[in-house]
Image (tube, rainbow, N blue to C red):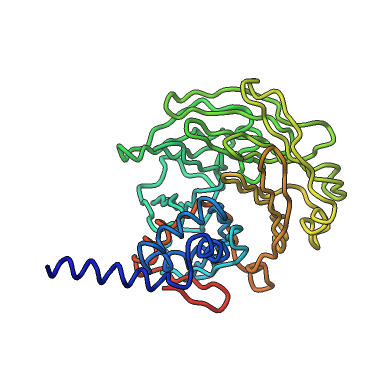
Amino acid sequence: MEEDNQQELKAEEEASATASIHGDVLEIILSHVPLIDLEHARCVSNNWNRAVFSSLRHLNPIKPWLIVHKQSTRHPYATMAHAYDPRSGVWLKIDQPPINQVSALRSSHSTLLYMQSSLQFAFSFDPLHLKWYRTNAPLVWRTDPIVALVGHRVVVAGGTFDLGDDPLPLEIYDLRTGKWDICQRIPAVLKDSPSSLWLSVAVDEHKMYVTEKSSGITHSFDPSTKTWYGPYDLRPGKHVFSSAIGFVNDSMVVVGLIGDSENVKGVKLWEVMKGTEMVELREMGEMPEELVGKLKGESACLPSIGLNTMGQFAYLHNPSDPGELILCEVADGACRWGSVRNVVGDDESRMQRLVFTCSDVGLGDLHDAICSGNRRFTVKDNIVD
């Protein structure tokens, strides 16, 4: 009898919580609430929990976040993060405990953060980078390599070594065995342009793709078989002087700068057509002229472009002046362009290191971050613990 009374009381409380807000009305209201606040809203009652997920499913779905990590270049190398949520159109400041520093924070592609020293290698790939993996340093020391996560393997390739001119071997760290392995064979693109500054990297479930930005020459690598494929020519035309690659809606895309570094005339997006052995490109859209101006900012030249991709989104920035961030959402084969001011792009940040990643952040990830007790989210003037 007592258990029945408790269930009736709980039902009455849930009914009271939604007495003035019913069905579709509640879902519409929740569709305008920032994602971080929905994590608390769904705990109000079972009805609110259902309304939150229904609103996300039917009215305003979750969209990938762009996360800007800022690290001091001086000891103790304090690191903080800001995230832009395009679903809500808001920035969040993410206060976090100091990362047990190995060295400078870096990222070669959209989801992976890493740090390396001569003794240790650390990396993180979960959406909010709550967990860091640490292991011995790669067998060969190198500076400015490309680092990519393909399945359960971390690939370290390219980079330079001050004491020799011979190309460095590719190394693979297996998360399952905890061991490093070496692949001696590398393509010409990693011999001629070994630094990650000159290369663009993208990954899917099975392969890593490496493009030389200036030429568009591309190779792919399967770490499970240690096999390289290519070369493929992904340069859309002679009018494109620099390009970058990524995956949007599970299709490889090429973003190209048109003109020259001192006179960028346009920015276009192409899709690499599936089933064509990476040789056929389809133009998807062109960045509006106004946004090209915002992308260039105050820079005298724009030699390359920063690109982060996830889901249906591509985020673009000027590596030398990332004050304005350009957004491209691809839906139904069409590009929807926009821009947002980088809240981290102030004068103070010019003396600090900025690293960009892109993440599929869901309510479960926010729940884990809040429950960990070491993440604090600030949305404008609201603080969520």
Q: Is residue 182 left or right of residue 87?
A: left
Q: Nearer the viewer, residue 17 or 329?
A: 17
Q: Position of residue 171 (x, y in %)?
A: 45, 35
Q: Is residue 316 left or right of residue 6?
A: right
Q: Position of residue 57 (x, y in %)?
A: 50, 50
Q: Nearer the viewer, residue 145 or 239?
A: 239
Q: How many marks?
A: 0
**Residue at the bottom extreme?**
381
Q: Above or below — where is 122 with respect to 330?
A: below
Q: Is residue 14 left or right of residue 228?
A: left
Q: Above or below — where is 170 with respect to 26?
A: above
Q: Residue at x 87, y 49 (%)?
A: 263
> Which quadrant of the rendered structure holds the N terminus?
bottom left
Q: Residue at x 43, y 72 (%)?
A: 19
Q: Position of residue 206 (x, y in %)?
A: 47, 30
Q: Residue at x 43, y 23 (%)?
A: 225
Q: Above or below — where is 382 with respect to 60?
A: below
Q: Nearer the viewer, residue 194 or 244?
A: 244
Q: Is residue 189 left or right of residue 148?
A: right
Q: Above or below — where is 363 with respect to 312?
A: below
Q: Position of residue 299 (x, y in %)?
A: 80, 59
> Which quadrant of the rendered structure holds the C terminus?
bottom left
For residue 2, which quarter of the picture? bottom left
